[in-house]
Amino acid sequence: DKRVRIQISQSLSEGVPTVTEIALRLGMSGRTLQRRLSEQDLSFKTLVDESRRQLAERLLNESEYALNEIAFLTGFSEQSAFNRAFKRWAGKTPRSYRLDAQAG
């Protein structure tokens, strides 16, 4: 599970990875990875979503990247899609999240 998350995070700047791409990086088939995740009651889609959220929060807190750069680094092709996803995750916009984090 942790290795899967790491591989997902490392590949997000190239776009959202497929289960097959991540499985190949881990030396297994897509079916095997799906089965292993299923055994842990996890879905690949959920892991991708969580990885994107965690990376976005970390970049907003710890970097000076512009919001459009963070959108790209987390696998979004457009900042508007990133803003919508982030608002769903955190209940606020990326800009508000960053301002709140800076305010401490």
Image (cartoon, helix red, strand yellow):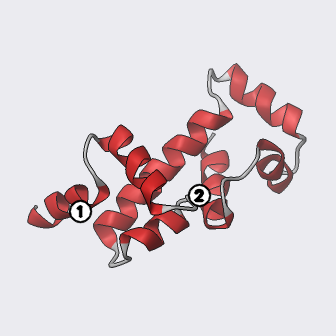
38 over 62 or under it: above or below: above
Q: Quadrant of the C terminus?
A: bottom left
Front-most of 12 and 78? 78
Residue name at image x 46 percent, y 58 percent? 55
Query: Residue 65 is drawn in which quadrant?
Result: bottom left
Q: Position of residue 94 (x, y in %)?
A: 30, 57
Question: Does dot 1 land on a helix, a strand or a loop?
Answer: helix
Per the rendering, the mark at residue 98 is 1
Judge left or right: residue 24 versus residue 15: right
Question: Does dot 2 land on a helix, a strand or a loop?
Answer: helix
38 over 55 or under it: above or below: above
Front-most of 51 and 39? 51
Judge left or right: residue 21 versus residue 74: right
Q: Position of residue 93 (x, y in %)?
A: 28, 52
Residue name at image x 70 percent, y 29 percent? 37
Residue lying at the far left in this picture: please name it.
Answer: 103
Q: Position of residue 50 (x, y in %)?
A: 50, 42
Residue name at image x 36 percent, y 56 percent? 57
Residue name at image x 86 percent, y 52 percent? 24
Quick one: label 2, few (<14), some, or many (20+) residues within 10 Å? many
Tell whether label 1 touches label 2 (CB within 8 Å): no
Q: Quadrant of the N terminus?
A: top right
Q: Which residue is mark 2?
A: 9
